[in-house]
Amino acid sequence: MILVGLKHLISIRDIRKEEILNILDESKEMENILNSKKSLKIMEGKILATLFYEPSTRTRLSFETAMKRLGGSVIGFTDIRNTSVMKGESLIDTIRVVSDYVDIITIRHPCEGAARLASEYSTVPVINAGDGSNQHPTQTLLDLYTIKREVGKIDGITVAFLGDLKYGRTVHSLCYALSLFEDVEIKFISPEELRIPKEIVADLLEKDVKFYETETIDLEDVDVVYVTRIQKERFPDLNEYQRVKGKYKLTLEHVKDKDLIVMHPLPRVDEIDPRIDNLPQAKYFQQSFYGVPVRMAILKMLLE
Amino acid sequence: MILVGLKHLISIRDIRKEEILNILDESKEMENILNSKKSLKIMEGKILATLFYEPSTRTRLSFETAMKRLGGSVIGFTDIRNTSVMKGESLIDTIRVVSDYVDIITIRHPCEGAARLASEYSTVPVINAGDGSNQHPTQTLLDLYTIKREVGKIDGITVAFLGDLKYGRTVHSLCYALSLFEDVEIKFISPEELRIPKEIVADLLEKDVKFYETETIDLEDVDVVYVTRIQKERFPDLNEYQRVKGKYKLTLEHVKDKDLIVMHPLPRVDEIDPRIDNLPQAKYFQQSFYGVPVRMAILKMLLE
Amino acid sequence: MILVGLKHLISIRDIRKEEILNILDESKEMENILNSKKSLKIMEGKILATLFYEPSTRTRLSFETAMKRLGGSVIGFTDIRNTSVMKGESLIDTIRVVSDYVDIITIRHPCEGAARLASEYSTVPVINAGDGSNQHPTQTLLDLYTIKREVGKIDGITVAFLGDLKYGRTVHSLCYALSLFEDVEIKFISPEELRIPKEIVADLLEKDVKFYETETIDLEDVDVVYVTRIQKERFPDLNEYQRVKGKYKLTLEHVKDKDLIVMHPLPRVDEIDPRIDNLPQAKYFQQSFYGVPVRMAILKMLLE
């Protein structure tokens, strides 16, 4: 048991730094196995339930791939219209039932706290695959893994977050996780309307993390630029949305000849100039791929 | 071949008592294997089709779990909007096509008789996973298995059915199955509007099964209380529904200190006081779990 | 590598005749293995993604069956409402992401050219499972396989196409494929409104394929009659639709005592008299079954 005391993975805040490092190490082993094209049987006979109360291609397919690469199998649902939820069954009852069927559960739910609640009633490990605007810890771990693999280290780096810093849960969780490492500096680049929330700022201040806030894209001395999608529905005024969107789009000029990597949790719409896709700096598809080894590591560690 | 002459499982009425006992014995072996956490390969290379023309989490996930625990795999659909049914394909044609792909089929369909019809055109065994208000034989078998495991016997017991006894197909099928055993007594507890239908009563009379009908919850000398959901849509008058629902809710007082077990086919809404969940008498989640070994047994026996 | 130079399967026009013959040979081996009920492990640890942007039971289930019969596993989606497509993700991004997860992709999409586009961005082989009214090459290959298995040869045969020859992509692709063989004759039987398009005719003329067009069903000296569904939405006038539909329905009289086989891509509605189902000439369910060995062969050859 490498994850001392960890039975579920609900929030990145539940995990100590040593445990995060263990997960990143295990992820590297999983990546090596994937690259060797060897077929694994670690999870032979084991079943993962993917309970998706809300749409998500990437996260679901990535978890399913991870489980199947480990030799296990998957059951689940992706559409609550076809489930007994529609007959009025409570989340707690669904979890009680499903946790008696399977070996491990991953859940995505629109309500904050749903995964935590699920873990309290489940007889098997529960992984939070996103609960509303709250937590999505496997995303944070694959973000950290991407930085470690592509920058080479996490300690001492400078990360710029770009775009919607107010609503993006991936940004908030990654900020927290980065604060566990040494000498990390953070640059928040966003329009006034979408500034990083006060509680995140307070958290960073408390932990003595150096950070700056700015409205201008300047990626000098930045190791990682983490781009997020600016959503139309956040703006009461469409003209304002169009103005902001154009101003916070990452262009070729922003990144070329710079020694940095570009990350994005995906899906993206048009916040990154497509010509960046072919630059060596573009790591968002690599990042998406890393979701598989990281989730393999998590499944393996929680079931050991 | 243990199920002499049984190629499909369409109705509990098609199975003789010896066959039921064989299924219950095989289910116990499957439960032992599940508990030992050993991985099975009995169904390696075999495929189950789950054709769900109607929503159902529990039944579908439980069948899929059963097949995967046996080492087999699953294909199917859960939403007819995404199938060629929408292009006007008949059930018969779908069955002809799918039965040439797979080794065994389980079907849920809103129309009575659909599973029987499917079995007539299928080249592989068909299991009825519910055809409208008609039959759901694997539910009946897991109900019997629960009684055998949790009460210790089926002969000689007293079963109280509580709630909607008019529309509940699980109640009707279980009544029939119980009538095959020795000295079973049945107590029907329901509002006037939801009394057990005359044909079930006639059946019990013919088989000399002792039974009572009452409107009052009294669980003295009862071994099993089988609770069902009272559905709002059965009542033209909402006040009447509220009155009935309150009166037929199982409370802590009804069951505490009694030597009985509480069963429910699930999903439940609020017909059982949640405080009962923690009593040793509450067996409805155990009952739901038993769906897996029972369905493993059925899949194995039909494919042997 | 038997499919010299073939990395993807997008259009039947991409494949040379020798490659088609190789696929048909490999399909026969797969059929033999299926019939022997042996469990294969060729694809153990390998994952197929089924990306279905449009409904299809038969094609999806048949691909999934093929992959599972080979010992592999499957991830995917069948309903774009539950995917990040709804968040505005481009097809290209979805393909980039998914192709990093899996070993091979099959895609169905409503837009012509979608599969070709996907293949240009995928890092793994892509199989077109239908792109709008354009191509569906695995259907064409299973049609050819059916002819070879049930007539015994493809060279020198006469094929009648019946029904909607204007919109049916299966007819157009099969015409092209047949033109690669020796001395094939084609008879187009359709109402005036649904005649075979000029570009198909031009293609056949160029390749010196003998063909006839007629409005009358006459199956004298025909080896294969390939029936298609006439769709109501093609007719502005409902009476006209009814008249045409009745006139182009295949009846018992058309086929009995004739030495021919009846094919249909399915699903069918009422364009074939159901009494034909029991005649030895009816091969449409056999044809549907052949989809499994043919797709097994294609998966195996593309992954080798």
Image (cartoon, coloured by chain):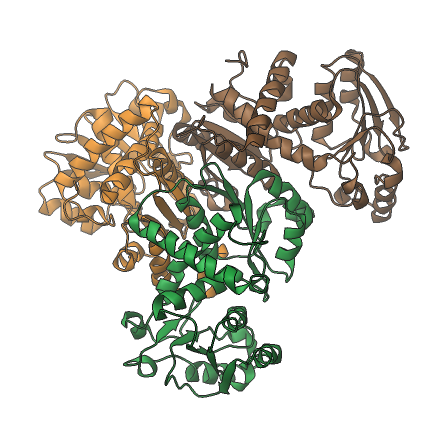
Chain colours: A brown, B orange, C green
Query: Where does the image place residue A207, in percent across and percent down from the top left?
Result: 77, 12
**Lateral position of residue A119 relative to residue B12, left or right:** right
Query: Where does the image place residue C2, in percent across and percent down from the top left?
Result: 51, 52
Does residue C244 sit above or below C95 in this rendering? Answer: below
Does residue B256 sit above or below A284 in this rendering? Answer: above
**Lateral position of residue A15 relative to residue B45, left or right:** right
Residue C256 appears in the rendering? yes
Say which of A30 and B189 sits in front: A30
Query: Where does the image place residue C133, in percent across and percent down from the top left?
Result: 58, 67
**Lateral position of residue B299 relative to residue B101, left or right:** left
Residue at image position (48%, 32%) is: A39
Say which of B47 and C204 sits in front: C204
Residue A114 appears in the rendering? no
- Residue B207 sits in quarter: top left
Does residue C189 sit above or below A248 in this rendering? Answer: below
Say which of C298 and B53 sits in front: C298
